Amino acid sequence: MAQRIETRMDRLEMGTKQGIRSGESTRPEAARPLARHARLNRKLRQDRRDGGGLRAAERAGTEPRQEAIRRDIYRWENDGQRQNP
């Protein structure tokens, strides 16, 4: 399960950065999901340090947060605004 969380976090971050490079997202648009991503990473690191790993409740709380970040990324990449290349 932890591998799945890490893999998804990596894909979300890569998708956000790719959106900036391709012009699908502007930097200000991408700042919010990147900040949320960083907060979630800090929380996961803290949870792992506190108990040696993630408990089921912590894992269950992580997936909805990841999904919200993914939805934000999708909305901003597909809102019709383009960054100047």
Image (spheres, rainbow, N blue to C red):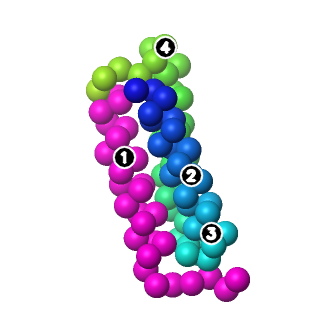
| Image mark for residue 48 | none
Q: Is residue 63 above or below residue 37?
A: above
Q: Pointer 1: what residue?
A: 65
| Quadrant of the rendered image containing residue 2 | top left
- The quarter in which the N terminus is drawn is top left
Q: Earlier in the sequence, mark 3 or mark 4?
A: 3
Which residue is denoted by mark 2 in the rendering? Answer: 13
Disc 2 versus disc 1: nearer the observer: 2
Marks 2 and 4 sit apart, C-alpha to C-alpha, by 25 Å
Label 3 vs label 4: CA separation?
Answer: 35 Å
Mark 3 lies on residue: 20
Magenta-drawn stretch contains 36: no
Q: Earlier in the sequence, mark 2 or mark 4?
A: 2
Front position among marks 1 and 3 = 3
Badge nearest the viewer, 3 or 4: 3
The Cα–Cα distance between marks 2 and 3, rounded to whole angstroms, is: 11 Å
Q: Find the residue positioned furthest to the right.
A: 85
Amino acid bearing label 2? Glu
Tell me if label 2 and label 4 are in contact, CB under 8 Å: no
Give the residues in magenta.
58-85
- Label 3's element? helix
Look at label 3 and name its amino acid. Answer: Ile
Q: Are marks 1 and 3 in contact (CB under 8 Å)?
A: no
